[in-house]
Image (cartoon, rainbow, N blue to C red):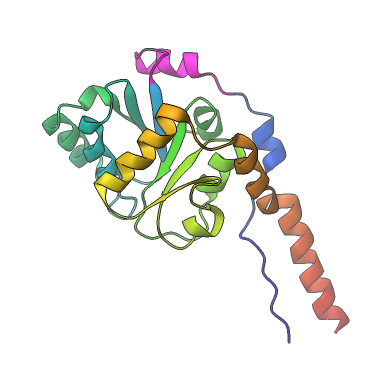
Amino acid sequence: GTVEYVPGVGIDIDKINSIQGNKEELCKELNISVDSILLLSVGELNDNKNHKIVIECLPELPKNIHYLICGVGPLKEEHEELAKKLNVSDRLHLLGYRNDVIRIMKSCDVFIFPSKREGLSVALMEAMACGLPCIVSNIRGNIDIINDGINGYVFDFDKKNILSCINALTKKNSINEDEILKHINIYDKKNIIHLTKRCYTSTFKN
């Protein structure tokens, strides 16, 4: 037999391209300055998603940097308490369940994905399709689609390392959007369907 690689379930890039972001509108919703720098994570508020490590970085980042999380989960109150303890409650925004994640992605500046374990994350692929520079943890799935320093940054689970990645993107935006979009096209749902059909056609022919 043969082995064929099909890169995940795919994302609908045409649909993503049809959605517009509006940073000014989002900042107004959050009651913060439109000059703010918005870091975004998407995922359940649980231990594996590891949002805590980003919250712990906030006191050492410029005060105009805000951290947004789309998602619900058991650690909501714990994250809020941590932010309160670190005096960054005004810079942590837990947005809960949202059905407009793509609009939010297109209104933010950086996508950060600090998970301890992942497969091939749809949220990460969607963020890349939105042209967002991504900062991701050094785990499988993430490193399958993020090439460190080329279309994003990869960090080990070290606060100093994360801070370095955030500063690199927020101060000089050292990642080219063309590189981000070039690396995501293979995950377009149309390509996934084509590859899957080819696998089945090849199997039945044999």
Q: Is residue 148 above or below residue 178?
A: below
Give the left or right position of residue 64, taking residue 145 as reference: left
Give the left or right position of residue 15, taking residue 83 as reference: right
Q: Is residue 1 above or below residue 55?
A: below
At a point 48% along the width and 42% down the height, the residue shown is 134
Quadrant in which the C terminus appears: bottom right
Quadrant in which the N terminus appears: bottom right
Give the left or right position of residue 78, taking residue 193 as reference: left
Residue closest to the eye, 163 or 112 = 163
Query: Number of marks in the image?
Result: 0
At a point 27% along the width and 21% down the height, the residue shown is 63
Q: Decide whether residue 65 is among the magenta residues.
A: no
Indicate the position of residue 203 as horizontal and vertical percent values: 80, 79
Q: Is residue 110 above or below residue 23?
A: below
Q: Is residue 138 above or below residue 35?
A: below
From where the camera sits, is residue 66 visible? yes
At a point 55% along the width and 47% down the height, the residue shown is 150
Query: In which quarter of the view is residue 83 placed?
Result: top left
Indicate the position of residue 179 as horizontal and vertical percent values: 62, 42
Residue closest to the eye, 106 or 75 = 106
Give the left or right position of residue 193, taking residue 133 as reference: right
At a point 51% along the width and 53% down the height, the residue shown is 121
Indicate the position of residue 164 as horizontal and vertical percent values: 33, 41
From where the camera sits, is residue 74 visible? no
The span picked out in magenta is 21-36
Indicate the position of residue 45 as horizontal and vertical percent values: 31, 45
